[in-house]
Structures are given as structure tokens and as C-alpha cells.
Image (cartoon, helix red, strand yellow):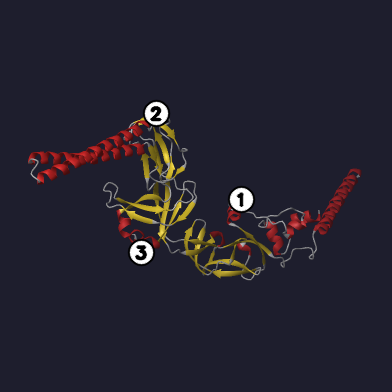
Amino acid sequence: MKVGKVSNRRILKQTALVLVCIGAGWYLKGKLTPSASMGFGSQMDTYVLVQELEKADVSSKQSYIGHVEAIKSVNIIPQVSGYVEKVLFNEGSYVREGDILFIIEQKRYLANVELRKAELQSAKANLVRAERDFKRQAQLSKQNYASKATFDTAESTYLQAKAAVSQAEANLDLAEIDLGYTEIKAPISGYIGKALVTEGNYVSSSTQNLARIVQTNPIRIAFSVSDKEYLNSKLFNAQDGESSIRSEIVLPDGQIIENHFQSRFSDNEINSDTATIAIYAEYKNDENLLVPGNYVDIKIGPKETQEVLLVPQSAVAQDEHGNYVMVVNNNIAEQRRVTLGDTIGTKQIVKSGLSQQDKVIVQGLQKVTNGTKVKAQLVTDETANKNNTSEKDNTPVEEEHPVATAVNASDVDINSPAVTKNISGSVSDTNTATEDK
């Protein structure tokens, strides 16, 4: 009997302890549960991310690989032989037509000019004597004092003297030309490359290249099109020529130059091996971005652009009536029915239903309906793409969100179940405990 009483007392004590714990738990739960006035109620605005529409040119363009080439290029070759006395240019510099580039030793050519001058003077002196003798014999012949043979000899001598003068003048001209060739001048304006011969070296006429000059402005781009494209495309056969064509040049570093033809022409025959024909287009090159010998991408299209609006695919939803998006107007979500076109990357062409001023909801779309009051945060393409790269980035945060303020947090996931539940009118037990704490 004594043992039974002890056991009953122990059971009573344990039962009392359990009841006390249960009561304390209910008490604490009541303390930790916020009142209706502290909840976030259904009156709280829904947070969404919005993005502006992009306008893009989708006019058809044909892309080709182009080869940059100089319209004019010259190899500097000596016309006379001799030792190089001077090199008068900086390698890689811009030279103008007529600038002196090289000087070949001139002493021998100067002496030759003087010799030819002396020969000319001698020939002129002989001409004067022969002319006087001819005139005298002509007078005597009229008076029948000189024989016919003597007159003929004087006439022949006079004519030979005149020819000798002409020959001496021509030899002098050739000597002066050779002397002029000792100063090698730039035949065109452009950039000159490396000097292939330096001072003190002997050069031979017409057998040795001294340097090379290329013209860079204007410049030419050559590309090939198939025979079918050439025959069918209006871009290459337009009657109004370059005025109807717009072109873009994509450099190897990705930089795009919008440049228009100064002139263009096509080759006079189709390559039978490749069934293509070469097109040559001349461009301005004021910034010297086009370098002869380089390869670029050239995009050819009509001059008239075709601009369309692009909407992010994340903003498009669908129901039984078709496609729609939600736009934010004065902090109110509005449903807009849209007609979509082709897909371009992560965006889609909007044919109708939107204007460029509209801002579409790209995140939080599932939480709003037509007429829902929202608080919108504008994001860019870069931010939106970053948010879609990982699961972490797919949960945007908001520092001023009411849940973040209530729990003293620096930011909060506005798509988490807890936040969604708070916005709809109640707070989870976990968040409640955190707030009281």
C-alpha cells in the first residue's frame, strides 16, 4: 500500500509539470503572436520588378566577310643606280605626294649634266658655222660661181649640224632626268612602311624595292557574294546606287562603324570556281580604324530602318484568351493583351498592345492581377539577366520592404513564401518569433 501511494504521487507531479509546460507554451505563443494591428494585412502594396521596353532595328541585313585593301599602293623603286646618301622620312609616318624620301649620290649625275651641256654648246657652235657656210654657198650657186656638188655638201653639213643640236638637247634632258631621279619622291600621299635600304647601301635601278606607301583614306573593302545573291538582291543592283544602301562594318574587336559607300563597283565576271562575284566598296577612313590587309564583317542592308519594340520573355504570360503582359501605370497593375512576333535572344517582338513608354512587370507577375496596387522597382537588362543566372539571384531583395523593416534585416527575399504570406495578410510563426525578438 505504501508503494502504491508513492507511485500515485509521482504520476501526479509529472502530470502537473506537463500541464504547467503546456500552459507556459500557450502563454508564450500568445505573447509572441502579433495583434491584428501589427500584421501586414492585405492593404500592403505588392512589390514587383519592372523593365522598360527596348526599341531595336530589325531590318534585314546581309553579312559578309570583307578584306580591307588600299585603293592606291606604291613600291618605291630607284630609277638610277648609286649609293644611298640620305633617308629623309620616319618609318611608319604619313608622307605627302612630292616629299623627298631618299637621295642617291648626285656627283656623277651632276657631272653628266655638265657634260651634256658642253656637248650642246659645241653642237650649237657647229650649227652656226654650218648655217653660214650653207647660206654663202646658196648665194654663190645662184650666181653660178659654185658648183652644184659644193652646194649640196654645204646643205648636208647644215642639216647634220641641226640634228646634232637636237641630239645634244635630248641628251641633256636625259641627264637632267637622271639627276632628278637621285631625289626619290613620294608619288602618292599615304603611310610609308619600313625603309628596306639604309644609308650607304648601293642600289640598282629598277631591281630593288626601297619602301612601300599605302593610301588609307579613302579605303576599299572587298567582299564576295554568290551569283544568286548578286542577281536577286536589289542592294547590289539598285538603280539609285549608294543612296539606298546602309552598311555597318564590324571590326575584329567588336566595334561597329556605321559607314556609307562613297562608291562601289562589282567585278566584271563571276568566279567559276566559287560561283561568286567580287564587290568593291570605297569608304571614308578618317579615324584610320580600317587597316589594309585586315578582315572585317560587313553588314549590308536597306537605308530605311525597321524599328520594333522588344519585350522580355519573362514579362509574357498566357491564358485561354492568348498572350498578355502586366504593366504598371500610376502604381496600379494593368493587363495588356499583346500580339507577339519573332524571338530575338531573350526578348520578343511586340507587334501591338504596348508603347515604348510602358513598363512591364518581369518579376512578381504571379502575385498581381488587373487593378492590383503595387510598388514597382525599375531594373535594367543587365540586372534582370543577373537575377536569372542562379537560384540565389532569382530571389530579388528589397531593403525597404516591410518584412525587412520588421525583422531589422538589411534585405529580404520578396519572393520567399514567408514574405508572400505576410503580404497576403498573415505572418508565419517563424517570422513572428523573429520580429518579437
What amino acid type is highlighted by mark number 2? Answer: Asn
Residue name at image x 8 percent, y 39 percent: 149
The answer to whether the residue labelled 2 contacts the one labelled 3, judged by CB atoms less than 8 Å apart, is no
Q: In the image, is 16 to the left or to the right of 74?
A: right
Residue wearing tag 1 = 391
**Residue in the foreground of this view, choosing between 305 and 390:** 305
Element under disc 1: loop
**Residue in the foreground of this view, choosing between 392 and 118:** 118
Residue wearing tag 2 = 201
**Residue in the foreground of this view, choosing between 392 and 73:** 73
Element under disc 2: loop
Element under disc 3: loop
The answer to whether the residue labelled 3 contacts the one labelled 1, judged by CB atoms less than 8 Å apart, is no
Give residue 435's position: percent from left, percent from top. 78, 56
**Residue in the foreground of this view, choosing between 27 and 293:** 293
Between discs 3 and 1, the one toward the N terminus: 3
What amino acid type is highlighted by mark number 1? Answer: Glu
From this viewpoint, is residue 77 visible? no
Question: How dense is the environment of label 1, judged by Cα within 10 Å: few (below 14), some, or many (20 and up)?
Answer: few
Residue wearing tag 3 = 240
Give residue 33's position: percent from left, percent from top. 79, 59
Q: In the image, is 113 to the left or to the right of 49?
A: left
Give residue 173's position: percent from left, percent from top. 30, 40
Q: Residue furthest right?
A: 2
What amino acid type is highlighted by mark number 3? Answer: Asp
